[in-house]
């Protein structure tokens, strides 16, 4: 009687080791690719001093509380002029607790674009006689922007308002 050996391949320990190492190599490789793409496309910080802002967060909370006690409100928007060249304007109005327009403020706008470039612009808003504040946006590229307005009164009271806007030229 003779034994017949089958020529079928059997899975050995080396095969299992190779399969496991291959699986984890693929998983680590894909993770490394995703992490590299994520960090290179957006580093995670929108401000240069995020660590210091975190340390000084209690001061930020105190400033917000002072601002809430003022009772001021703001309206922020984008308008379009119909002059020879169509121009977009950032417009805002500020009101006190009695809903009266605040006409004597120094208003600065800080715009940050929502994109990979993280473009920023800062501009001073001009005021008119009825209490509206505006700035020309012709130098600002189209896109989504985060606007932060800082209004300072003659007596030193500070009010900060934020709004996301869309600029289309």
Image: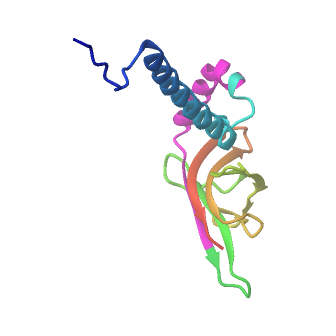
Main secondary structure found in the magenta portion: helix
The residue sitting at 78% across, 66% down in the picture is: 139
Chain part drawn in magenta: 52-79
- In the image, taking residue 35 as reference, residue 134 lies left or right, namely right
Residue 76 highlighted magenta (yes or no): yes
The location of residue 15, given as percent across then percent down, is: 45, 20
- In the image, taking residue 106 as reference, residue 144 lies left or right, namely left
Q: Quadrant of the C terminus?
A: bottom right
Observer-nearest of 20 and 118: 20
Observer-nearest of 16 and 120: 16
The residue sitting at 60% across, 20% down in the picture is: 58
The residue sitting at 71% across, 85% down in the picture is: 83
The location of residue 145, given as percent across then percent down, is: 62, 55
Q: Identify the colour scheme used.
A: rainbow
Q: Is residue 152 above or below residue 6?
A: below
Q: Quadrant of residue 155?
A: top right
Q: Is residue 114 above or below residue 16?
A: below
Observer-nearest of 55 and 1: 1
The location of residue 93, given as percent across then percent down, is: 59, 58
- In the image, taking residue 167 as reference, residue 5 lies left or right, namely left
Observer-nearest of 120 and 100: 120
């Amino acid at each position: 009687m003779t034994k017949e050996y089958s020529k079928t391949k059997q899975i050995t320990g080396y095969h299992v080791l190779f399969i496991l190492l291959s699986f984890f190599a693929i998983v680590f490789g894909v993770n490394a690719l995703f992490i590299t793409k994520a960090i290179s496309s957006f580093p995670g910080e929108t401000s240069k001093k995020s660590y210091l802002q975190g340390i000084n967060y209690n001061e930020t909370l105190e400033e917000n509380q002072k601002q809430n006690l003022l009772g001021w409100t703001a309206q922020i928007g984008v308008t379009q002029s119909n002059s020879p060249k169509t121009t977009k304007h950032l417009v805002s109005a500020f009101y006190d607790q009695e809903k009266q327009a605040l006409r004597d403020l120094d208003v600065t706008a800080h715009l940050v674009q929502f994109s990979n470039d993280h473009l920023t612009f800062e501009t001073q808003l001009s005021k008119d006689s009825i209490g509206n504040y505006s700035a020309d946006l012709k130098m600002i590229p189209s896109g989504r922007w985060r606007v932060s307005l800082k209004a300072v009164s003659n007596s030193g009271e500070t009010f900060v308002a934020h709004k996301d806007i869309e600029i289309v030229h």
